[in-house]
Image: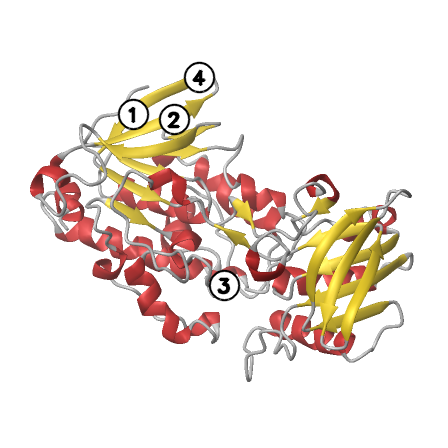
Amino acid sequence: MATSSGHVAVLGAGPVGLDAALAATDAGLPVTVYEAGPAVGFHVRSWGHVRLFTPWRLNASARMRSHLARAGHEPPDGAAYPTGKDLADRLLRPLAALPALAGRIRLGHRVAAVARASLLKHEHIGTRTRAAAPFRLLVDGPDGEYEDRAGLVLDCTGTYATPNSLGDGGIAAPGERALAHRITRTLPPLHAEPGRWAGTVLLVGAGKSAQTAARGLAELPGTRLEWLVRDRDPDWGEVPDDSLPERQRLVSVSRDLAAGGHERVTVRTGARVTALAARADGRVRAAVTTPAGPHEVVADHVLALTGYAADPALYRQLQIHECYATGAPMNVSAALLGSAGGDCLAQPAVGLETLRNPEPGFYILGAKSYGRLNTFLLRSGYGQVDEVAGAWAAAEEPLAALRES
């Protein structure tokens, strides 16, 4: 099972990870994909019931379509809006079954840490000695832990490792950790289990996941919704003249709910959860501050959709320059911050130099490269893979070209 220092290691078998693996095989490079879950796109399947607000044409790369077409599959394309399940079943699963990726994907193998063989984090900063040392991967597999080596590592593990807390300032509210078992932190299949959400639901968050949840909960007849939004005057992520109608529909519904357009929904803007506590009757009491003063919500369910943070522990022993604000690689964050509040369709393309880290040969691609910025689209990740693939195509020694700092 051991790989050599000439290998490309791709961490994560989601959309960007599989696209990166295809790029490596197109360049004739040996590649291994490590996926912690039991299937490709495992995280995507966890929100399989959710419909994307971007159409197929933005969710499948040209490389993916080309490989599928050559193998006799009809690539998903066009203006239809896939669900997460569609993305996994119609795109990721057929890609994983292609001969180009046969035997290259290890399911149930989580890369726990990456380091430089024989070097510590602070040693040989910016030297050829560091660039020449192979990466050492510590992997947890079905049969226990083992070690692999790689010459190039592409971290495509996404940002879904750690859900953000619902407390003020981004840390847990008092009582939140003790009630962790009572808090749902992923967008649930509301209409598939409507009885599950009977009673009062406390929803915290204002992003697209929270907006989707609010719309769904408002449609359940046995549910009353208390929706807490941090901003006092939220814009709901509205984009002028939005070219994505599904996204604009979410904004419109959110504005309507906030304006009092539904008798079973109360939206409190400028609100903060200051404490959570369990009641004797099994419900949860939330102490809340609002512009109008203190408030109390007694809820049967707590749904915290406040976003996720990537896990930097994976590369703790590597020389990664992270942005102090976003947690993303510094160069990428600097390129994106000027448009972080704008339309995700208008995000600037980033070149290979922007994707480089101080650690030669270690690239963070996909949603993880955006850190806390919420403007990532899959096509942005595919564009990053194209930059890496372009370097492979232009170099006589592709791995050496990408290892240069």
In the displayed structure, would residue 177 be above or below residue 134?
Answer: below
Percent x, y for residue 242?
Answer: 56, 79
Q: Determine the residue positioned at 82% across, 62% down.
A: 296
In the rendered structure, which disc, 2 or 1, sits on the residue that comes first in sequence?
2
Which residue is most to the top?
143
Q: Quick one: 72 or 225, which is closer to the camera?
A: 225
Rounded to the nearest angstrom, the CA distance separating label 1 from label 4 is: 13 Å
Rendered location of residue 373, percent (x, y):
46, 63
Q: Secondary structure at mark 2?
A: strand
The amino acid type found where label 1 is placed reads Asp
Q: Name which of mark 3 and mark 4 comes first in the sequence.
A: 4
Give the farthest residue toward the bottom.
241
Q: Report the amino acid beneath label 4.
A: Gly
Reading the image, the residue beneath label 3 is 374
Looking at the rendered structure, the secondary structure element under dot 4 is strand
Percent from the top left, x then y, of residue 138? Answer: 35, 27
- Mark 1: few, some, or many residues within 10 Å (few <14, many ≥20)? some
Q: Earlier in the sequence, mark 2 or mark 3?
A: 2
Q: Residue at 19% of width from left, 53% of height from top? A: 391
- Distance from disc 3 to disc 1, alpha carbons, whole Å, reads 33 Å
Residues 336 and 302: in front is 302
Residue 350 vertical placement versus 386 (above, below) = below
Looking at the rendered image, the quarter that the N terminus falls into is: top left
* Residues at circles 1 and 4 in contact by the CB criterion of under 8 Å: no
The residue that label 4 is drawn on is 144
**SS under mark 1:** strand
Q: CA distance from mark 3 to mark 4?
A: 36 Å
Q: Amino acid at mark 2?
A: Val
Q: Earlier in the sequence, mark 4 or mark 2?
A: 2
Q: Which residue is mark 2?
A: 139
Q: Are marks 3 and 1 in contact (CB under 8 Å)?
A: no
Query: How crowded is the residue under tag 3: few (<14 C-alpha within 10 Å), some, or many (20+)?
Result: some
